Image: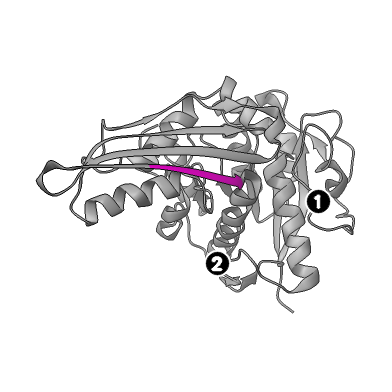
Amino acid sequence: MLNRAKVAVVGVGNNVSALVQGIALYRATGSLPGVRRPVLDGLGVGDIDFVAAFAMSPEKVGKDLTEAIFSPPNNFPRLTDELPHSGVTVSRGLTDTTEVERVAREIAGAEVVLYAAPSGRQETARAYAEAALRAGAAFVNITSDAVARDPQWLERFVTAGLPLLGDDLTSQFGTSVVHHCLLRLLEERGLTLISSYQVNLGGTEDFRNLVENNNTKMQSKLNALTAKQSTAGRVELAPLGYLPHLESHKVAHINVEAQAWGGTSVSLDLKLKVHDPSGGAGVTIDLVRMAAGALRQQRAGYLSEAAPLLKSPPGTTV
């Protein structure tokens, strides 16, 4: 029987709710809507066992993981009526960096640590990366805080023989990937980009946090859009907007202004509406399986095959 990947999660928000529920749904039904890779490095989408979880909210600490994911302010909908208990009790997360050793002990035995806490807390992200190092686990950072793209941290994981994947996932079908494809299409078809912008509105607690702590997120989104000189300086991002009534939906507006043959104008306006946590889970499942596979294959550091799934891989701006 195939050994399932053992994963510890940091943060029990909407993204983890979508991930936990989706894994249980695919495992129970065998159906695979929205799955790009049914099997990756020998692991199916249901071949994930959660072995530890950390959160700071009193409403979540002490509960089984499959109960905690429905505690407010989480608002991602239920994907299934029946969700079996995980057997994992959510522990209190790090209150300061002196607790790294406690967390390292609690994640002992995990193959992968998935860091899905709110963005904008770089020292916290690195403290959990330190705990993963001490526990001998791979680390996957799906937030915009710089860990994998920091050369010193990457070197530490390479030296320890452990995979390090990040930073900041590119949602399965979100604003960044759609906007990037539109800009690439312009270039491929010979049009000249004049200007472009995107506006993002959302109703999750993650979105509220990003509105208040958007320094790393805005840079990470720019990393995903302006890697080429042809777009640098011509793409703008409006400040993120938090609208609670949207709940787990994200609504994005993208505008592109360009010139075609003879300098004639081309203008495009697009609206995208998605369940933001689902878009994250559809990519996280691949990142986690890549990390577990690499650990088993004794491949250390960053994995180049993860690049399409990330906004800010190593080599991009911190």
Residue at the farthest left position = 262
Q: Which residue corresponds to mark 1?
A: 78
Q: Is residue 29 magenta?
A: no
Position of residue 163 in the picture relative to residue 65 (left or right): left
Locate the N terminus by quadrant: bottom right
Count of marks placed on residues = 2
Q: Is residue 271 magenta?
A: yes
Question: Mark 1: which amino acid?
Answer: Arg
Location of residue 178 in the rendering, given as x and y in whole percent from the top left corner = 43, 49
- The span shown in magenta is 269-274
Question: Mark 2: which amino acid?
Answer: Arg
Chain-order first, disc 1 or disc 2 = 2
- The answer to whether residue 150 is visible is no
Q: Secondary structure at mark 1?
A: loop
Location of residue 31 in the rendering, given as x and y in whole percent from the top left corner = 71, 72
Disc 1 to disc 2, how far (Cα)? 22 Å
Q: Which residue corresponds to mark 2?
A: 36
* Residue 124 figure quarter: top right
Crowding at dot 1, Cα within 10 Å, few <14 / some 14-19 / many 20+, comes out as: some
Location of residue 110 in the rendering, given as x and y in whole percent from the top left corner = 70, 54
Q: Residue at x 50, y 49 (%)?
A: 165
